[in-house]
């Protein structure tokens, strides 16, 4: 597996989106790849720190309003070009 794929799977593992097969492939890869092993370790620490920080996220309505604003600005910009 290429390191780019291992990095992507590492991110999926942190967000509990990885399949069992993804986890197996990642673990096999990090056995022999020092760089990905280090990335996985750092990514895990970062995720734990973020969870501990109890950061408040935007509520879904605010996110949707922001998305609509950005979509409108992009559409306006495309019409001008």
Image: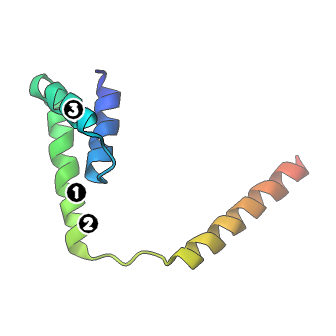
Q: Are marks 1 and 3 in contact (CB under 8 Å)?
A: no
Quickly name the residue at label 2: 50
Which image quadrant for residue 47?
bottom left
Quickly name the residue at label 1: 46
**Residue 40 at x, y percent in the picture:** 19, 42
Residue at figure coordinates x 16%, y 55% from the top left = 45
Q: Are marks 2 and 1 in contact (CB under 8 Å)?
A: yes
Residue 49 vs 6, above or below: the answer is below
Quickly name the residue at label 3: 26
Residue 74 vs 41, above or below: the answer is below
Residue at figure coordinates x 88%, y 46% from the top left = 81
From mark 3 to mark 2, how far is it between C-alphas? Answer: 22 Å
Q: Which mark is residue 70?
A: none
Secondary structure beneath label 3: helix
From mark 1 to mark 3, how far is it between C-alphas? Answer: 18 Å
**Residue 34 at x, y percent in the picture:** 13, 28
Q: Earlier in the sequence, mark 3 or mark 2?
A: 3
Secondary structure beneath label 1: helix
**Residue 66 at x, y percent in the picture:** 63, 70
């Amino acid at each position: 597996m290429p390191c780019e794929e291992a990095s992507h799977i590492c991110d999926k593992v942190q967000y509990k989106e990885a399949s069992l097969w993804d986890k197996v492939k990642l673990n096999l890869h990090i056995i022999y790849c020092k760089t990905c092993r280090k990335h996985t370790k750092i990514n895990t620490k970062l995720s734990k720190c973020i969870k501990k920080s109890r950061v408040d996220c935007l509520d879904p309505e605010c996110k949707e309003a922001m998305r609509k604003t950005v979509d409108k600005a992009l559409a306006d910009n495309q019409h001008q070009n």
